[in-house]
Image (cartoon, rainbow, N blue to C red):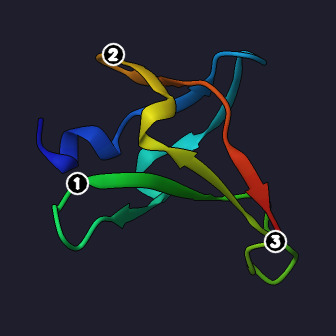
């Protein structure tokens, strides 16, 4: 799968059934030795001036299913 196809997908948290964001909004954390994706960093909320208020880290291992329109994830750590 090309990243351009992956970036269009919505991220859904399986525990709460809520939309977390889209892959295209995320930054990728890549292992420099192996080139593997380690995690996705999603912005959480924005202030009035467009600044990010925090991030949600989703480890690659927490991705349960990549479907045609969405990515189902379980868990994810919030940091502010």
Q: Give the residue drawn at x 81%, y 71%.
A: 53
Q: Earlier in the sequence, mark 2 or mark 3?
A: 3
Is 67 drawn above or below residue 57 in the view shown?
A: above
Pointer 1 local density, CA inside 10 Å: few below 14, some 14–19, many at least 20: few
Q: CA distance from mark 2 to mark 1?
A: 20 Å
Secondary structure under tag 3 reads loop
Please determine whether, in this image, residue 69 is positioned above or below residue 55.
above
The image position of residue 43, as x and y in percent, is 65, 62
Q: Residues within 10 Å of mark 3 (few under 14, many from 20)?
A: few
What residue does disc 1 label? 36
Q: State the residue in front, 71 or 75.
A: 75
Relative placement, left or right, of 9 versus 19 is: left
Residue 56, x across and y down, in percent: 68, 54
Residue receiving disc 3: 53
Nearer the observer: mark 2 or 1; the answer is: 1
Looking at the image, which residue is at 47% across and 53% down?
Answer: 40
Q: Earlier in the sequence, mark 2 or mark 1?
A: 1
Cα gap from disc 3 to disc 1, whole angstroms: 27 Å
* Residue where numbered disc 2 is placed: 67
Q: Are marks 3 and 1 in contact (CB under 8 Å)?
A: no
Asked which secondary structure carries label 2, the reply is loop
Q: Quadrant of residue 6?
A: top left
Q: Name the residue at 67% across, 32% down.
A: 75
Q: Quadrant of residue 34?
A: bottom left
């Amino acid at each position: 799968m090309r990243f351009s196809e992956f970036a269009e997908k919505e991220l859904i948290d399986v525990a709460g059934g809520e939309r977390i964001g889209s892959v295209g909004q995320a930054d990728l954390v890549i292992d420099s030795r192996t080139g593997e994706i380690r995690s996705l960093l999603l912005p959480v909320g924005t202030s009035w001036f467009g600044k990010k208020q925090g991030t949600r880290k989703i480890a690659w291992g927490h991705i349960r299913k990549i479907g045609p329109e969405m990515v189902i994830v379980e868990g994810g750590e919030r940091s502010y």
